[in-house]
Image (cartoon, grey):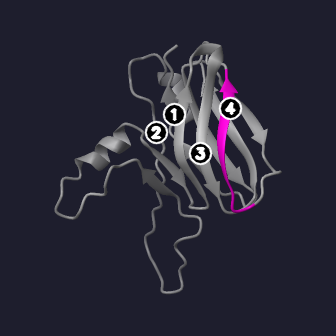
Amino acid sequence: IDAMNNRYAGTGLRPKYAIGDVDTYQKWPHDDLFPGFAVNYLQLDRVPGPDDDWSPILKTLRDGKFFVTTGEIFIRNYAVTGTGRESRVEADVDWTFPLEFVEVVWGDGQKVGREIIRVTELAPLGTKHFAIPFDATGKKWVRFAVWDSAVNGAFVQPVWLTN
């Protein structure tokens, strides 16, 4: 996803997104499907019913208004605030297992950079507002991810930057 967004940065195309997807071809009664299956949490005002118009779901996916998780980490809110050297990546995160690190990943159209912030001091079953300073000068896009001690993760979709 990072290489794709660097390739398309500044072309006028939309960012490229990664959805949580699992392909299974055969299921047995003893299969435990929940652990390790990534899911997509969509920002919707309401979930459409079976007889409703489902185009809001498609629009939300097209607009990148979702995050992917295996369920142990929940990103309630996410935003990139400020501009240039005064930018911040902000996120409200809940988690189950102790966290290992959060990361801010960005690209300038040529190379990918990242800042990894260790957060091992945070206890399990926690919640925190992260406000990570980020110099967006010359950057084309940014995304945010969270990883825990059991190697579960959650990540938001890349956001095009306008500086």
- The residue under label 2 is which amino acid type? Tyr
| Residue appearing at x 52%, y 58% in the figure | 38
What's the distance in space between the residues labelled 4 and 2, CA to CA? 22 Å
Reply above or below: 90 against 22. above
Residue on which the image places disc 2: 17
Residue drawn at (66%, 40%), measured in percent from left and top? Answer: 130
In front here: 9 or 72? 72
Q: Are marks 4 and 3 in contact (CB under 8 Å)?
A: no
Q: Is residue 151 above or below residue 88?
A: below
- Report which residue position mark 1 lands on: 158
- Nearest-to-viewer mark from 2 and 1: 1
Q: Which mark identifies residue 92?
A: 3
- Give the x, y percent position of residue 153: 63, 53
In front: label 2 or label 3:
3
Q: Local crowd at mark 2 within 10 Å, few (<14), some, or many (≥20)?
A: some
* In the image: residue 118, left or right of residue 10: right
Q: Position of residue 125 (x, y in %)?
A: 69, 62
Residue at the spot x=59%, y=64% of the render? 36
Give the tally of numbered discs.
Answer: 4
Indicate which disc, 2 or 3, sits on the residue closer to the N terminus: 2
What is the three-letter code of the residue carrying label 3? Asp
Q: Which residue is mark 4?
A: 132
**In the image, residue 129 lies in the stretch drawn in magenta:** yes
Q: Earlier in the sequence, mark 4 or mark 1?
A: 4
Q: What is the C-alpha distance between the residues marked 3 and 1?
A: 17 Å
